[in-house]
Image (spheres, grey):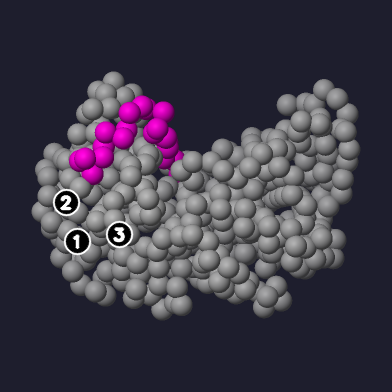
Amino acid sequence: MQSQAPPVDSSITRCCIVGGGPAGVLLAYMLARAGIDTTLLEEHEDFDRDFRGDTIHPSVLQILDELGLVERVLQLRHTKIRDITLQSGSGPVAAVDFRSLPTKFPFVALIPQAVFLKFMAEEAAAFPSFHLVMGAGVRELIQEDGLVRGVRYRDHAGWHDVRALLTVAADGRFSRIRRLAGIKADETSPPMDVLWFRISREPTDPEGALGRFGRGHILAMLDRYEYWQLAYVIPKGTYKDLHAAGLEDLRRNIAELAPELTDRVGELQDWHQISVLSVESDRLPRWYQPGLLFIGDAAHTMSPVGGVGINYAIQDAVVAANELTGSLRSGRMSVRDLARVQKKRELPTRLIQTIQSFVQTRILSATLRSRSPGTIPPALRVLLSVPQIRSIPARVIGLGLIPVHVSQELI
């Protein structure tokens, strides 16, 4: 898309980050803290959007601890998930126990993403090298001599140019920068979609995170103090059929999976209360071009299985800051510098996406096809009864496959 008018103004920065999600905000904070002039562009006027990922896993809590932020983050209102229990017609199974992890933070913190992003932006604003522009819709890449030199965005005042040594695309699973750069991802097609909605929570309800299975349905329940944040998993492409069957059918299925919610499913009165997430998974074959780097969901769209998307995005940001701060300070950025980020982050990303694909196709897909009330495979029950086995998913979900730490030079 070509702009129809000259820019209102033009600015110069060392690093221009497009996208104010977890990866973009964390990277902007780290670079600004290191004295790198950084401009963060966020298309929306605020951070407040429903049903974004809210899970801050132990791996990220450790990163925030290294940055000296974790105590203030944990002062934000949050709930703690210390374990995950699966429930089916054949009884409960303790599936994940984060208490066993070798970390100061043996839990997942559930913090509304908007609250976390606002906190991080306010922390970054303490540094004069941080510049945040809200309502900035990027529409063009500025390209010269085969290099990306920045972006052109539009806001209520008109067009603006931001010229930068490095442009970072952190603009999520629907990345506009991907399209502008003409990059296509290698895609997979997970066999499910997810409906997100809320139902009120009573003090007598169980706590933490619960998974309910039965008769071709899956329901995940996240404790959010006054309400349950619910994820209702359906076979991919079946939302129209579900909608046609009506809300009463959906309410009945929820009550069957979670009998304690029977007296509250009537709170679902309109389909507008429900958000539909089309589950996708993909990965760019190359996460960079000269002058341009992709991180987070812009580089690799993640399935919601395990809730690890935010954490992998933040780990991308930490590695990018570790690897590129020196080049940004010197004013010289090479393709080799950008390639180091992908080299360090591609393997763990490939591995977790492989694990997610296995869980989706071998466990969740089979559950969605089953009409049995007890759909947790007996073999899985036996395996999860062994503490050493149960510690494996806790480690994979909680800490990740390859730990990421903040470089000593940036602490």
Residue sitting farthest toward the top: 244
Ranked by sequence position, the earlier of labels 3 and 2 is 2
Q: Give the position of the C terminus as an image quadrant.
A: bottom right
Task: Tell me: 38 left or right of 72.
Answer: right
The residue closer to the viewer here, 382 or 343, is: 382
The answer to the question of whether label 3 and label 2 lie on touching residues, with beta carbons closer than 8 A, is no
The segment highlighted magenta reads 261-281
Residue at image location 63% in from the left, 71% down from the top: 67
What's under tag 2, amino acid-wise? Ser
Real-space CA distance between mark 3 and mark 2, rounded to the nearest whole angstrom = 17 Å
Within 10 angstroms of label 3, few (less than 14), some, or many (20 or more) residues? many
**Residue labelled with disc 2:** 88
Do we see residue 2 in this rendering? yes
Residue behind mark 3: 207
Q: Is residue 238 magenta?
A: no
Q: Which residue is mark 1?
A: 93
Number of numbered discs overlaid on the protein picture? 3
At 67% from the left and 68% from the top, the residue drawn is: 322
Query: Within the magenta stretch, is there residue 267?
Result: yes
